Image (spheres, rainbow, N blue to C red):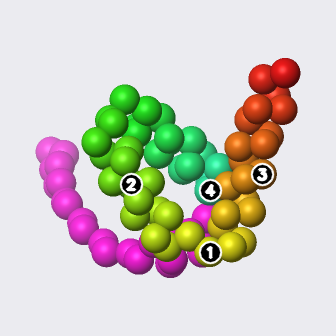
Amino acid sequence: MPVTVSKAVEVTVTAKDFVSQCGIDDVACFATALAQKLDQDFVGRAHAANAFAEGLSEFGARWLAEVVTSFYARKR
């Protein structure tokens, strides 16, 4: 007679630890999923943008500029 067992596990991981375990493709996939989630959430998007900007470094700003440049270069 088979037995079915269900378990729920909750693990808390810091954003820094999460990102350190991700590969480049994982980071891109995560950023895309986040952008899609916030696409129609105007209030959440403004709050997320503000929180992101507060923690943004010069290197992060350069990367973000590369993302935007790449997006618009592809549109041409």
Residue interval drawn in magenta: 1-25
Q: Position of residue 8 (x, y in %)?
A: 20, 60
Can residue 27 be seen here? The reply is: yes
Where's the N terminus, which quadrant?
top left
14 vs 63, left or right, is left
Label 4, secondary structure: give it: helix
Within 10 Å of the Cα at label 1, are there few (<14), some (14-19), or many (20+) other Cα atoms?
Answer: few
Foreground of the two, 49 or 3: 49
Q: Please name the residue that numbered disc 1 is placed on.
A: 57
Which disc is residue 48 wearing? 2
What residue is rendered at 40% in x and 64% in y? 51
What is the CA distance from the residue labelled 4 to the residue labelled 1? 17 Å
Q: Earlier in the sequence, mark 3 or mark 1?
A: 1
Residue drawn at (72%, 60%) of the image: 63
Instruction: Name the residue beneath numbered marker 4.
Output: 27
For this view, does 2 lie left or right of residue 17? left
Query: Which mark is nearer the camera, 4 or 1?
Result: 1
Mark 2 or mark 4, whichever is nearer to me = 2
**Where does residue 60 sit, x and y in percent of width and height?**
66, 67
Counting residues from the start of the chain, the first of labels 3 and 2 encountered is 2
Label 3 CA crowd tier, 10 Å (few <14, some 14–19, many 20+): few
